Image (tube, rainbow, N blue to C red):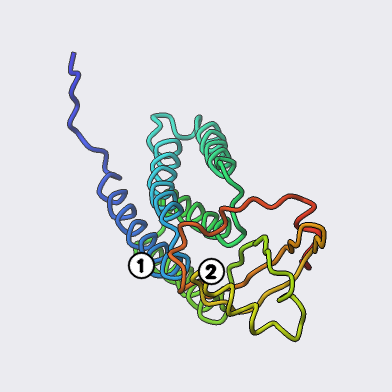
Amino acid sequence: MNIFNFTFSPDFPLMIVRFVILMIVSWVIVDRLYFKKSHRRDFYFSFMLMSVAIFFLVYFMIFVLEDLKAKTSIGIGIGLFGIFSIMRYRTDAMPVREMTYMFVIIALSVVNAIANSVSVVELITTNLIVILCIWISEARLKQEPAKLVQYDRIDLITPDKRGELTEDLTQRLGLHILRVEVGSVDFLRDMAMLKVYYDAASSDGDLDQKIRLTTEDRKQFPA
């Protein structure tokens, strides 16, 4: 019995080419477009490995089955089940922007995995169109991440002292503050809830979005 079978299928070289294309495209999207603004190392790690996992999951579930005609529906079903399971895989609430990038990475991984009858030129063109759309969106829309802050100097929350408030928050947080929204105010404890918008370039991103907002907290600020 031949345990070690070193023969490759005719589609194997094309699969490697499609995988290399996917890795280059994923790196451009994650490193040059996403990470350049967000600086979220945790999502960088997740997006890249997710791209690899989904590509091989879909490819082997659909195209490396011996009886393709009889098992295609089963392979597609299992592949889609795995994809949507990954989309549900998270420990913390994922921001909308990160969720959008995750969907793009998943979509490109699936497209590159199942594009067996598409030429390499068509596949590269499709990937470039997606990159171009993301680049245009990122270039035109300025990102304003925000933090929820419990503030102890309620004497500075009045509109006429907004400059002093911004300066105090800048010194405490070490961020370039863009604007501040005042939420609920507790005069008994001299505390106020502030939603602080800041320039993403002034933060390393590791601590962004770490504060979990309750439903009552979210009601204090406009959508």
Q: Does residue 146 appear to the left or right of 182 in the view shown?
A: left
- In the rendered structure, find residue 220 and report the number of the disc placed on it: none
Q: Residue 121 shows which numbered tag?
A: 1
Q: Which residue lies furthest to the top in this view?
A: 1
Q: In which quarter of the image is residue 122?
A: bottom left
From what the image shows, is residue 150 above or below residue 143?
above
CB within 8 Å, label 1 to label 2? no
Quadrant where the image shows the C terminus: bottom right
Mark 1 vs mark 2, CA separation in Å? 52 Å
Q: What element carries label 2?
A: helix
Residue 153, position in %: x, y? 69, 69
User: Residue visible at 20% across and 19% down?
Assistant: 3
Give the percent coordinates (x, y) of residue 174.
Answer: 49, 71
| Viewer-proximal residue among 27 and 152 | 152
Q: Which image quadrant is residue 22 in?
A: bottom left
153 or 16, which lies in front?
153
Tag 2 residue: 172
Image coordinates of residue 47 in percent, x first then y, are 44, 52
- The numbered mark, 1 or 2, whose residue comes first in the sequence reads 1
Specify whether 212 is left or right of 98.
Answer: right
Residue at the image point whose x is 25% and y is 49% from the top: 13
Is residue 210 positioned above or below 58 on the image? below
Query: Residue at 50% of width from left, 34% of height from top?
Result: 75
**Amino acid on which disc 2 is placed:** Arg
Q: Give the vertical position of 67 relative to 220 (above or below).
A: above
Q: 182 or 87, which is in the foreground?
A: 182
